[in-house]
Amino acid sequence: MRVDVVTIFPDYLAPLELSLVGKAREAGLLDVRVHDLRDWTSDRHRTVDDTPLGGGAGMVMRPDVWGAALDELLAPAGAPGPADGGVELLVPTPSGEVFTQRTAERLAERAHLVLACGRYEGIDARVAEHYRDRGVAVTEISIGDYVLNGGEVAALVVVEAVARLLPGVLGNPESLTEESHGASGLLEYPVYTRPVEWRGLVAPEVLLSGHHARIARWRRDQALERTAVRRPDLLAALGPESLDRHDRAV
Ligand code: SAM
């Protein structure tokens, strides 16, 4: 997968060189390129913003500068283009659709993602409109109901969540099967390791039993309880077919 991130603070994306994402890049599983939006400016001051039409506080990012950058990055020579559905433009914004594990799974199927990191009061609304009109898949994406200073943290969230789903990125792909927000629709059960007793707290005895069926049942019950307490909305969204006879008794 190729990922282009456009920002006025390229250094903000340095964590993409670390840990699993960094290793995936080194292994050639992920081609991440971070670009400085100011490289597409044409004035001496490398201006990317202007005052909001209609008045009001703050500054708005100019569509002409973003247009120059995105024209180039959405159709790089030899890369998959809009026609084959390989590329998706992601515009982080607190007014976007909320980014979830389902979104990450969907994006992991893409050959190419382009992330446009806004700053100030955001990017002129015509940018997303223009690329949609041109047939590009565009998603305005929010990472939660709060306001950040810029789209860079959102870009880090999206790239990490998507990258770990790509084949070969996680050392043990089984890590993905029982996770929170996965196929079961439940939060993950609590996890423990050695020492068995720590500061007077003893890990659940069942986990030491070696009895796989009992452990699986205990974990399922814990996942149900935890979801019921912490995220009743997730439990309510599960269809009856997702629950077995034992589940209903929990
Ligand atoms: N004026 C905008 C509003 O009220 O919707 C907020 C702009 S915010 C200060 C600047 C930039 O931060 C946005 O353009 C976006 O790139 C990013 N941003 C802020 N909060 C975000 C969130 N919850 N999810 C994704 N991106 C966010």
Image (cartoon, rainbow, N blue to C red):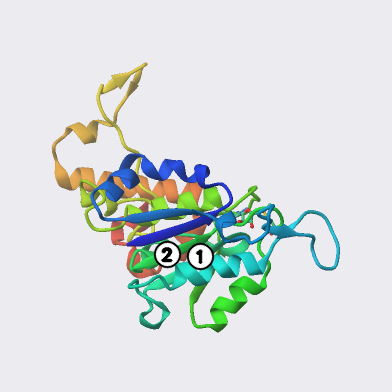
- Whether 99 is drawn above or below 135: the answer is above
**Does the CB distance between marks 1 and 2 fall below 8 Å?**
yes
| Location of residue 69 (image quadrant) | bottom right
Which residue occupies 49% across, 47% down? Answer: 229
Q: Position of residue 176 (x, y in %)?
A: 28, 52
Q: Which residue is mark 1?
A: 90
Amino acid of disc 2: Leu
Secondary structure of the residue carrying tag 1 is strand
Q: Which residue is mark 2?
A: 113
Amino acid of disc 1: Leu
Q: Which residue is more in the foreground, 21 or 61?
A: 61
Q: Which mark is residue 60?
A: none
Which residue occupies 51% across, 47% down? Answer: 10
Residue 128 visible in the shown view: yes
Q: Quadrant of the N terminus?
A: bottom left
Q: Position of residue 213 (x, y in %)?
A: 17, 48
- How far is mark 1 from mark 2, CA to CA? 7 Å
